[in-house]
Image (cartoon, rainbow, N blue to C red):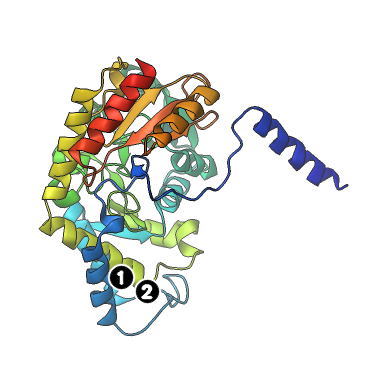
Amino acid sequence: MDKKNLRIEEQLKKRAQMGNKRSLNLTDETLVDFSSNDYLGLSKSGELKKQIISAYEKLPAKNGSTGSRLLTGNSLFATQVESELAALFGYEASLVFNSGYTANLSFFSCLPQRGDTILYDELSHVCIKDGSRLSLAKSMPFKHNDVEDLERKLKLSEGEVYIACESVYSMDGDFAPLEALCQLSEKYNAKLIVDEAHSTGVFGNNGAGLVAELGLTEQVYAVIFTFGKAMGIHGACVASNQNVIDYMINYSRPFIYTTAPSLFEFISIQQAFTLLKNTPSLAIDLKENIALFNQELSIQRPTQYQSKSAVQVVITAGNQKAKATSAQLQKMGLDVRPILSPTVREGEERLRLCLHSFNSKKEVMSLAHGLNSLLC
C-alpha cells in the first residue's frame, strides 16, 4: 500500500476514534432550523428569488463571468453594484469577492508588508489567520476581546500595524469592543479591520453592519462584509478607501488569479439588499426572538455567552456530550448542531444555536425549554 495513503487512513482513523471525524450530511428539512446562518430567512425567500430572476432576465445572456475581473470578467453592472455597496456601508469604494474567506485571505495576504505587524483577536475566523500567514508581515494573536493585552502588543509592534477582529464572533456570538478598539487604533496609529460576517444585514441601517450602527465607519480602516449568512445568497466584499481597493486590484493574488463572480451573483447581492431595505421587519423579528430565547432559557451561562446576536451558545464540555445533546434535541424536532474540538478548544465543545426571523415564538420557546429540560 502507498505509504501516503496509509498515513491518511491512520489520521482519519485516529480522528474517528476521538469522535470528531467530519462528514458531509444532508439537512433534515422536517426539523425546525436552529443551526443555519440564514438569520433573516432570505435564502428561503420566494420574493427574493423572484426579484433576482426578474432582474437577471433584463440583462444580456451571460451564464458565466468568462475570466478574472482583469481580463473578461468585469462589467459595468459589477462596478455599479460595488459602488452601491460602498455607499450603503459608508465607504469610498468596495470590491466583491466569491466568499468571505477569499475576501479576508485577499486583504491580509496583500496589504500588510514585510516589517509590518498584524494583531488579530485569537478567536478570529481562520480566514483572517490564514491570510496573515500568507503575508510577509509579522502576525500574532491577542487575547479575546482583551484590550489591555492588545495594547501591550501594540507597544511592541513594528511598521504599519493592522488590528483584526470580528464584530460578532461566529462561535461565541459575543461582540467585539469596537469603540475601545477604535480608540486604541487611533492612539497607536494602527489600522482597524473588522469582519462583519455575522452582523451584515442584521445590524445597521439597511443591514450596513455593527460598525455603521455604532457610528464608527470613519475610524475603521476596512470592513469585510459577507453575503452568505443573513443576506441569504453568496459572496462578500471589502469596503475601504479607493487607494486600498486599487491596491488590491493590482497586488492581491486571490483577486487577480481567480474567476470573477458571475452577473447572477452581482444581481443576487443587489436584490438581497433591495429586499432588506423594503422589509425592515425581518431584523426586528430576529431581535425579538433573541430576547425571547434569553428570557426563557434557565441554564446559567457565562457572561460571554449571553449574547444579543443571532448566535447563541451552550457549553457542554466534551464531544460525546455535545453530540448526544444535539441528538436529543433533534428527536424533539429541533435542528441543533454540535460544535466539536478541534473546531473549538477541548473542554469548550458546545451547541451553537442560530436564531432566525422566521422562527415562531412557539419554536423559540420549545428550544429554550428543551435545553432547560436536558441540561438544568
Q: Amino acid at mark 2?
A: Asn
Left-right relation of 248 to 276: right
**Percent coordinates x, y for residue 9 in the rendering:** 76, 41
| Residue at 11%, 49% in the rendered image | 281
Query: For numbered disc 1, what is the local secondary structure?
Result: helix
Residue nearest the observer in this picture, 43 or 363: 363
Can the viewer see residue 83 in this picture? Answer: no
The relative height of residue 201 versus residue 179 in the rendered view (above or below) is: below
Disc number at residue 354? none
The relative height of residue 60 versus residue 342 in the rendered view (above or below) is: below
Reading the image, the residue beneath label 2 is 74
Q: Quadrant of residue 3?
A: top right
Q: Amino acid at mark 1?
A: Ala
| Residue at 43%, 78% in the rendered image | 72
Reading the image, the residue beneath label 1 is 78
Can the viewer see residue 30 in this picture? Answer: yes
Residue nearest the observer in this picture, 6 or 107: 6
The relative height of residue 83 versus residue 224 in the rendered view (above or below) is: below
| Residue at 42%, 22% in the rendered image | 156
Give the alpha-carbon distance from disc 1 to disc 2, as whole Å.
Answer: 7 Å
Query: For numbered disc 2, what is the local secondary structure?
Result: loop
Q: Which quarter of the figure is the C terminus placed in?
A: top left
Q: Residues within 10 Å of mark 1 (few under 14, many from 20)?
A: many
Left-right relation of 269 to 328: left
Residue nearest the observer in this picture, 222 or 13: 13
Residue nearest the observer in this picture, 12 or 201: 12
**Percent coordinates x, y for residue 4 in the rendering:** 80, 45
Q: Are the residues flagged by discs 1 and 2 in contact, CB closer than 8 Å? A: yes
Q: Residues within 10 Å of mark 2 (few under 14, many from 20)?
A: some
**Percent coordinates x, y for residue 346 in the rendering:** 53, 21
Left-right relation of 89 to 127: left
